[in-house]
Structure formats: structure tokens, C-alpha cells
Image (spheres, rainbow, N blue to C red):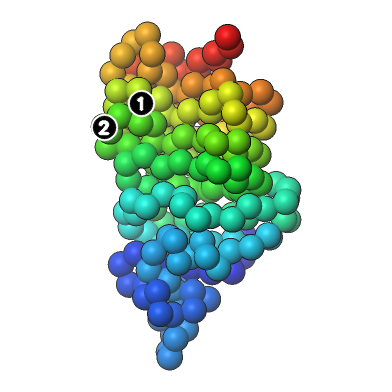
């Protein structure tokens, strides 16, 4: 997959243009923060994230218009290990976003490693890992105000502290897809499809 823009939390600089994975010269090089990288994205563009640990989540990410060529994509660069630490969320009506190759580590905090809410929809997570959700710590949470979300080829493990409430993935929405995922060592069920 070709990348359009780049973020490097260790060696990047927000004064650079974000068009190269490493510093080239002048102002050509990766951005430093996710927010600066997201600001460059538009329909059909892909952001490559260099190895490191990031804690700001998806604030400010724009939407795409489908999950094909017109998606907004966030992907680890060249299979490097990229960790989104603590809880991340995609909300505020965001849609048609692909997240590929990210490790979501809630670090034992109360919220899930990834929560999709606030009328967000058509969010695809693929080749990801979701771990260490604490109390109320499902690996992934899709509330009823979202729809058409997907998790594919991912590992969901070591989430939650309460058997009756904390699961690998907690699905309240419609049109959900869970495909070819591995669930293990979650306190509750691997998948809880909840309906009122």
C-alpha cells in the first residue's frame, strides 16, 4: 500500500511537510504528532505511522467516502510496531476509516483499548491487536449509536476484570463484522452481542 503522509513520534517534526518517512532536507520529513498527520489526510489518502508509542488517539481524523479507494487509512509503516497507549476512540460521526496494523493497549485503564461511538460508522480495523482493557475494559466496544463496523485478522486478549461485564468485543450495533480474529484470555466472553 502506498503512503501519502508520515508521522514519526521520535524523529519527526511538525514544522516538516509530512511527505517522507524520514528527514530528507529543508522541510521534507515526517510530522511528529498524530494530530499533525491527521490534518494532512483527505479522502483516499493513507498515513504511515513509524514505530513508537502514541497516546493522543484519533482526535481530528477526517472521514472517507467508502472503504475502498476513497477511505481514509491509518497504517503502521513497513510493519513497524506502533502502539496507541491507553484508550482510543473514533467518534463524532467519523466514517469510512481503515486502521491497519496498530496495537491498541489500554494499559489497564477503565476504558476499552478502542471504542467507536458518537454515530461513527464504517470503521474497519484490520491486522490489529487490542489488549489490557481494565474495568469496563472490553477489547473493542461498538455501542448502539454506531453501525457497519469491522474487525478483521486481529487479536483481542487480556481485557477486562469482571466476568459478567468485560468481554473481548462488546457489540451493540447493527451490521457488525468480526472475521478471522483470535480471542483469548479475556475476563468475560470473547464476543458479546448485546441486544436490548
> Between 185 and 124, which is closer to the camera in this rendering?
124
Task: Please provide percent x and percent y for residue 26.
Answer: 43, 91
Task: Please provide percent x and percent y for residue 79.
Answer: 46, 55
Q: Quadrant of residue 93?
A: top right
Residue 115's place in the image compared with 185, above or below, is: below
Alpha carbons under labels 1 and 2: distance apart? 8 Å
Q: Quadrant of residue 24?
A: bottom left
Task: Please report whichever mark, 1 or 2, sits nearer to the chain's N-terminal start.
Answer: 2
Mark 1 and mark 2 residues within 8 Å of each other at the beta carbon: yes
Secondary structure under badge 2? loop
Residue at mark 2 = 108
Task: Please provide percent x and percent y for residue 164.
Answer: 37, 8
Residue appearing at x 66%, y 46% in the figure: 96
Residue at mark 1 = 137
User: Residue 19 — which label?
Assistant: none
Residue 20 is at least partly visible in this image: no
Amino acid at each position: 500500500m502506498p503512503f501519502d503522509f508520515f508521522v514519526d513520534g521520535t524523529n519527526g517534526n511538525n514544522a516538516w511537510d509530512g511527505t517522507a518517512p524520514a528527514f530528507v532536507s529543508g522541510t521534507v520529513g515526517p510530522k511528529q504528532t498524530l494530530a499533525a498527520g491527521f490534518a494532512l489526510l483527505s479522502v483516499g489518502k493513507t498515513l504511515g505511522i513509524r514505530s513508537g508509542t502514541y497516546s493522543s488517539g484519533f482526535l481530528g481524523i477526517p472521514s472517507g467516502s467508502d472503504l475502498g479507494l476513497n477511505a481514509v487509512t491509518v497504517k503502521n509503516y513497513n510493519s513497524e510496531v506502533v502502539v496507541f497507549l491507553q484508550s482510543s476512540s473514533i467518534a463524532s460521526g467519523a466514517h469510512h476509516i481503515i486502521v491497519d496494523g496498530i496495537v491498541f493497549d489500554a494499559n489497564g485503564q477503565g476504558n476499552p483499548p478502542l471504542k467507536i461511538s458518537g454515530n461513527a460508522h464504517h470503521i474497519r480495523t484490520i491486522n490489529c491487536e487490542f489488549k489490557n482493557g481494565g474495568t469496563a475494559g472490553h477489547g473493542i466496544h461498538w455501542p448502539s449509536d454506531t453501525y457497519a463496523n469491522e474487525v478483521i485478522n486481529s487479536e483481542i486478549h487480556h481485557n477486562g476484570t469482571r466476568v459478567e461485564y468485560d468481554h473481548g468485543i462488546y457489540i451493540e450495533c447493527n451490521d457488525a463484522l468480526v472475521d478471522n480474529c483470535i480471542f483469548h484470555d479475556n475476563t468475560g466472553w470473547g464476543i458479546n452481542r448485546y441486544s436490548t
